Amino acid sequence: MKRYVNFIGLIVLALLLMPGAAMASRGTARVSLLKKTSDEPSMAKSALKPEAKWVIDGDEHRIVLEFMPLEFMGTRGYLGEVSMDGKKGKVLSSYKEYDSYNHPKMGKDKKLRGKLYPKTVEFVVDPNKSTYNLTFYVPVMGEMGFGEQEARLKIQWPAGMGTAEKKESAEKKELPQNTSSPLNLEDGLYSLPVSLWHESEDKPSMGNGALDEKAELLVKDGRATLYLGTKALKVSNIQASLCRVFYETDEGLRAAKPLAYDLKVDGESLPRPSIFALPLEKKANWMKVKVDPKVAPMGDEPLNARLKMDFSKLQKMEMNQSELLQRGERGGKKPSFKDAHSYVDKGVELSVPAEGFGEDFEFYANALMGNDLQNKLQQLKLPVGTKGYRLEARAPIETIPKDFTGKVQSLGKSLAPQKTVRIAFPFKGTSAEVFNEKGQKIPATIKNGKLFIETKQLGTFFIKTGGSIPKAKGGFTIKPPAKVKAVKPAQAQAVKPVQRVKPAQAQSITTQPAQSVSPAPASAAESAAPSENVDSAESSPDDEWDGNDSPPEEKSESDPVDAGNDTAAPSVEKDLLQEKERPGLIILFFILILAALGGGVYLTQKYYRMYMDELMYEADREREER
């Protein structure tokens, strides 16, 4: 009996010592972010790494999501708190950086002040469920009053998992009842309260702050025209205003007429429209619209919304009391595309000569992120850290077909310049190389904090930097918590040679002292700077930035907004160092596994010998007793 007990104990001990017998199952799954009320990709899709890790530990299934910073033409921002189905996850790692929102002392966001932004978060999940409600906080949108954003997490479980899964679609919310009636208004001018609301929820839309609360309704010969006013909404360094408005018709959506190009925005030479006019055929509580507030984090796609109209507060007014109508009739006209102009989008400037395009166009600049960027870099064999930008010129969109489900931007015809155009990227660094989408190097130069190229074609461009720091434009400047005073490099001094001791037979060698090296004057450096026709762009001394000085456009440290933004972006070397540390951790992990295996084998052999010795001993005793 005793030998059977020992044998069972040996087997149990071997199983406990064998790694892998008690290890949890692991794997990866594809994940994506969808809008809460539709199966379209969420605006925050680029903030989630498309591959997540899952772990099965006993009866518990967990998934680890990795959140990435959002970048917009040199600006960077992070997601704040994240919860799934109303439950907060376990933060496994964080971005150890501070900005103007989460700075311990000067952070503007009370919810995030002193807190680090999450990088990897672990949630308990059900393998038979593939869709979860995700709530996350966006600091820059918190300044606009809608920091809490909702989306749906879609998990593509690998084969063999989720067999009992039920297909789940977006939560469809019924729109509030919309009553309508004939206008029945006499000719004249009226004041009408308006507001922009969420397309399906009872809350203001993201673009509501850029809409004037009072609209004007002109009724003439029985026909009514609604005049909507827009204003500039500034949050940190991000400015917004309604640049496009589409209103509902029987055939779909039609573009409202922009008027009064007199709205000035910092960093843009051309004015934006401040008034939009659209026909109104009936009284209604609201009407479906699409609006483009031109905010980088929201992208270029117009947002679905509802224009609420409070006809209970409709008031008649005199013509001389009009503001929107008069400005719409007398205000500035849209600059002609035939003239030479500079167009700016998200910090990128497109300078077009006269007759540079054959028809009217709109300029769009967007940074490549996530898999789109990584795939392009792999195809062109460009290093990690290279920035990618997609530049487009498209014809203005007049109509959106009914029940159209694609990207609205695709409805605008893509246009190519007829002449060479000049592009300026916001940039701060000492050198850079620019490539087009075919991998061909483009001559470039750096001056006054911008990187310039000239081209006859728009498309995708890549900027490869040698550890230089992109210039921050917008409200997402990520910087370390403390500002370190720049240290001026010491002037090189003469080096005195060291005389060697030689045997008597050796010949004496006379060594001349090295000459002292003095820094070249600024004029010499400027004369040596490459011209615009060189392949590798280098900056002049005035453009150099040591990473600690504030950019020229920043205010003094007394400004509460800039006070949290007075340090430099994280260095590329730090990221490379972290990448180099990972193989070491993997090697250490395997060493531990081998050690455990070796220990298990040693103990197994030891107890096996003990067990065999005991068997031999028992056998000898039985023979002696016989």
Image: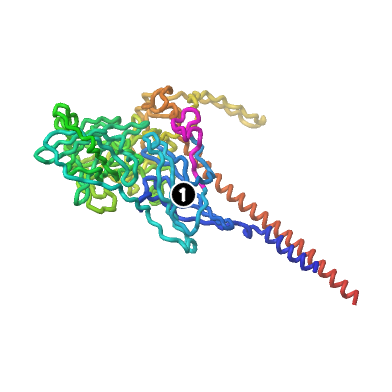
Could you tell whether 354 is left or right of 28 in the image? left
Instruction: Note whether 288 is above or below 539 in the view shown.
Output: below
Counting every numbered tag in the picture gives 1
Residue type beneath disc 1: Asp
Q: Residue furthest front?
A: 312
The answer to whether residue 441 of the structure is visible from this angle is no
Within-10-Å neighbours for mark 1: few <14, some 14–19, many 20+ = few
The residue under label 1 is 85
- In reply to whether residue 107 is colored magenta, the answer given is yes
Specify start and end residues of the magenta stretch as a single range.
98-121
Could you tell whether 373 is left or right of 196 in the image? right
Could you tell whether 89 is left or right of 245 in the image? right
Residue found at x 47% / y 56%: 29
Report helix, strand or loop for mark 1: loop
Asked whether 208 or 602 is in front, the reply is 208
The answer to whether residue 375 of the structure is visible from this angle is yes
